[in-house]
Image (cartoon, rainbow, N blue to C red):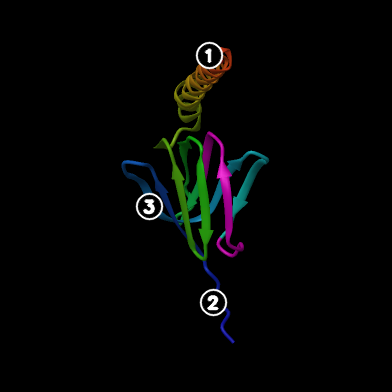
């Protein structure tokens, strides 16, 4: 009987235009809508929708590293953990990364909220216009 158990995971952080990072890690901490969670090499396969926040991971040499990520999806399948995010920034200083999240990602969410609100107003106005049209009765 084999007692082989994985000692690391292969973390890959994918952005729309690049692979931000790809390296073996021993621990990953990420944040979903219902809170933070931790992945270790022997955890079961897992999928989670991520919220903007700090991704923390421990490298094989024991260093804690960070990446600021926008919304995204995390998929753990065996030893492979892939994270696909809209935006991301890798770094070693958590304070700097948290400031970037607050500055960049939260502002983008506000712009998105305003755009959706404007679109909803436009749709309502268009619908009212159609309802006000009267066809000639003949």
In terms of secondary structure, where does tag 2 sit?
loop
Residue that numbered label 2 is attached to: 4
Q: Earlier in the sequence, mark 1 or mark 2?
A: 2
Residue 136, label in figure = 1
Relative depth, front residue between 41 and 81? 81
User: Which of label 3 and label 2 is nearer to you?
Assistant: 3
The percent position of residue 126, horizontal first and vertical second, equals 51, 17
Quarter residue 127 falls in: top right
Relative depth, front residue between 63 and 105? 105
The percent position of residue 66, horizontal first and vertical second, equals 47, 40
Q: Is residue 100 left or right of residue 29?
A: left
Magenta segment: does it hold 55?
A: yes
Q: Earlier in the sequence, mark 3 or mark 2?
A: 2
As drawn, 51 above or below 104: below
Residue at image position (58%, 49%) is 48
As drawn, 65 above or below 128: below
Q: Is residue 26 left or right of residue 43?
A: left
Q: Could you tell me how far apart the alpha carbons at marks 1 and 2 are, in whole angstroms?
A: 80 Å
Q: Could you tell me how far apart the alpha carbons at marks 3 and 2 are, in whole angstroms?
A: 23 Å
User: Which of label 1 and label 2 is nearer to you?
Assistant: 1
Q: Earlier in the sequence, mark 1 or mark 3?
A: 3
Residue that numbered label 3 is attached to: 22
């Amino acid at each position: 009987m084999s007692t082989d158990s994985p000692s690391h995971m292969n973390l890959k952080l994918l952005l729309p235009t690049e692979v931000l990072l790809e390296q073996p890690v021993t621990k990953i901490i990420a944040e979903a809508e219902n809170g933070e969670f931790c992945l270790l090499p022997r955890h079961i396969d897992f999928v989670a929708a991520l919220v903007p926040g700090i991704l923390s991971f421990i490298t094989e040499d024991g260093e804690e590293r960070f990446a600021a990520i926008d919304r995204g999806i995390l998929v753990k399948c065996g030893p492979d953990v892939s994270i696909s995010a809209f935006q991301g920034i890798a770094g070693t200083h958590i304070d700097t990364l948290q400031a970037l999240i607050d500055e960049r990602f939260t502002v983008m969410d506000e712009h998105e909220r305003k755009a959706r609100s404007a679109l909803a107003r436009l749709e309502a106005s268009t619908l009212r216009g159609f309802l006000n049209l009267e066809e000639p009765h003949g």
